[in-house]
Image (cartoon, helix red, strand yellow):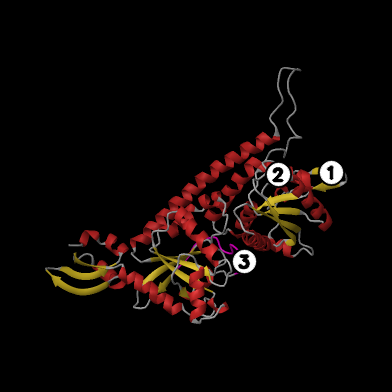
Amino acid sequence: MHLQSIQDYAHDGDRTFCPMRLIPGRMSSDMIEHISTPPGVILVGVRHREMTVSEAQQHVAELARLVDTLGYAVLDTKVLRGSTPNPGLFIGSGQAEELARLADDLEAEALIFDDELSPSQQRNLERRTRVAVSDRHEIILEIFHEHAVTREARLQVEKAELAYQLPRLRRAWTHLSRQRGGAKGTRGEGETQLEIDRRRITARQQQLERELTEVRRHRSTMRQKREAVPVPTLALVGYTNAGKSSLMTALTGKKVLRQDKLFATLDPKSSRMVLPGGVEVIVTDTVGFIRKLPHDLVEAFRSTLEETIRADILLHVVDASSPQAGDEAATTRAVLSEIGADTASIVVVLNKMDLLGYDRESIARASVHVAGVDSGIPVSSLTGAGIDDLRARVAELVTSSRVEADLVIPPDRWDLVAMLHREGRVITEVMEQENVHVRAELGGRLRQVLAEFVV
């Protein structure tokens, strides 16, 4: 939540407050956990005209989980009625005064809104309530900052942070400026610190874009090398905390970070999985999605999400035990559509069925709950139940995508014959005049690699 390296203190009588996003440096959730009393916050949701009370409460409950991931203490939760957002305060002035009294009574350090606030709305609310004001966008940025591991992820997060930070520099250094120079009246006021900070941020944004371009070029090269070996690819997608990392461990045996926190993993991780029949696929775990995911983060992580776009099969992992499973599945489908990844074969995986039971009624109810899905594959990545059924379904899809083809392999390319046996299914293999005539079933990637040898 502390995105800027500048201070912005304001005073009202004897009370001094400091917006959390402006405190120099950062406190990670691990640091906060070692503080005897974690910072107390009040969560604020606004029920807009098209929302039900239940929907508004669900959104704020999810915000509470985001805040908990950062280690802050929720002192109270308020869901306010709203129609047209107030351009100055986002909420009504009376509601702002009510929040100010509540924050004073509870000695809260911040108000965190579930909706995205404009820079002016944040400043006006801070003046009116006399506590720091933040929003969901900022909370998600801070979580991404803490959880990014690879160089690319860190660059992407910093780029998104600077885009959020730049319009919020106003007022930060208005009390400072360079001294006037020269004779009286011959020169105007020097450059303000605000202008210097803006220029530095713009320069840093340009540098980040250059570095990201280089990282993307390297990623593209690595991807081309992988695609030269025609192994089918499988991507795990879904709402954050749906259990994708646990499912990857259950499928591949590769241990990855598993935490009951939102956005526990950001960087894609890949591993090989052997399907029934001996066919290998590459499984990739991707970043989770969430309601109101800031658009600049979707843009920032677009290159990372290309792993999803290029996958042959998507496993859409749904937390079947979640009361909001239908909404969460719809959010995932919307993001997949936005990034152009909704054209691949999609298998819906109803995860965490151990929390519901494996009887036919529970499975049917969970399937219906996920809007737009007639049936899903029930599994438990914790107990391993249903994993074999899921592997069999993936194997069926990989096999069904194959077509028969006749190939003539020259004598200097016996490696391709070995590849056919490893990645396809050889039906016949005959030697004729030093060439190898092969009839085999080929998947899409294998057909691309061997296109020049097909007759």
State the predominant SS element of the stretch in magenta: loop
Which is more N-terminal, label 1 or label 2? 1
Q: Nearer the viewer, residue 204 or 11?
A: 11
Q: Is residue 194 above or below residue 234?
A: above
Which is more N-terminal, label 3 or label 1? 1
Q: CA distance from mark 2 to mark 1?
A: 19 Å
**In screen coordinates, is 294 left or right of 455?**
right
Which is more N-terminal, label 2 or label 3? 2
Q: Amino acid at mark 2?
A: Leu
**Residue sitting farthest toward the bottom:** 359
Location of mark 3 (residue):
261
- The disc placed on residue 89 is 2
How crowded is the residue under tag 3: few (<14 C-alpha within 10 Å), some, or many (20+)? some
Contact check, label 1 and label 3, Cβ < 8 Å: no
- The disc placed on residue 12 is 1
Counting labels gives: 3
Residue 83 in the image: state x and y as whole percent. 65, 48
**Residue sitting farthest toward the right:** 14
Q: Which residues are magenta?
A: 259-271
Q: Is residue 266 magenta?
A: yes
How crowded is the residue under tag 2: few (<14 C-alpha within 10 Å), some, or many (20+)? many
Residue 227 in the image: state x and y as whole percent. 36, 60
Query: The C terminus is located in which quarter?
Result: bottom left
Q: Is residue 184 above or below residue 149?
A: above
